[in-house]
Amino acid sequence: FNLNVVTDTAVYEQTPIRKRVKACLLNEEGRSYANLNTFGSNRCGSWNFRDSTGYGLGRTVLHEVGHQMGLSHDGQPGLEYWGGLREYRWVPIMGNFWTGTSWGSRALYQWSKGEYNRANQREDDLRLIGRYVSRRADDIVGTRPLAFGGDGLVRVAANRGKITDQTDSDSWTFTVGAGGGRVDLVIDRTEYVGGAMLD
């Protein structure tokens, strides 16, 4: 999405009200919460309390800002917050995203549309977010050859892509010479340890 996350009040106030959302961070213990549909308001629409890690607070703010854009909880009948699929380490952001914490760096947090068994609602989170925020243009259309340095190693900074929506895929190609050879390929996500947030 085309977003600018700021903590500078002057930058925030330069943005037209209809294009901004305000999430307040509090340096005290408590349970975070948000008002529904407060995107485009000048007031604080969510209150996010201190967390033990910055990454945990980031997930909480993401969840609460989801409410500010009109999103409901992802649960199951009799369960307001669904904890995800342990075997896939997948958690909906609007569900109980804290279960993913125990899964470490392999946890995957996503906006959902109720694509799991016994979902209590099937709202398309990405479509609803799109009412307020535009998507970034696809950075890699088709495929791109891997960029290598003079030492023969892949140049990490030159081989990055952003997944812009559910149908986007970024791919790179390389060719092993006619004489053959061995290729060791390691693919690392660039997200902070604690899980990816992809869609």
Image (cartoon, rainbow, N blue to C red):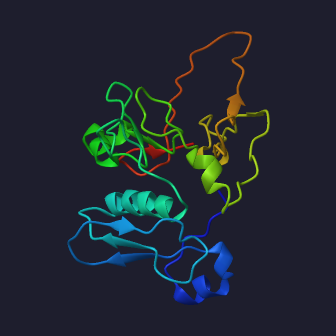
Task: Report the front residue among 182 and 20.
Answer: 20
In the figure, residue 169 lies in which quadrant? top right
Expressed as whole percent of the image width and height from the top left, the position of residue 91 reads: 39, 39
Picture quarter with the C terminus: top right
In this view, the residue farthest toward the left is 29
Q: Is residue 150 left or right of residue 69?
A: right
**Up/down of 70 relative to 12, above or below:** above
Q: Please state, as top left, top right, bottom left or bottom right, where the N terminus lies in the image.
A: bottom right
- Circle count: 0
Q: Can residue 193 be seen in this view?
A: yes
Percent coordinates x, y for residue 140 in the rendering:
75, 41
The one nearer the camera, 71 or 2, is: 71
Q: Residue at x 20, y 72 (%)?
A: 29
Residue furthest to the right in view is 142
Looking at the picture, how far across and down is residue 41, in whole percent? 57, 78
Q: Is residue 160 left or right of residue 137?
A: left
Q: Which residue is drawn at 44% across and 69% down?
A: 35
Quadrant of residue 166 in the image? top right
Depicted 168 relative to depicted 126: above or below: above
Q: Is residue 196 above or below residue 22?
A: above
Tell me residue 11's x, y (percent): 60, 84
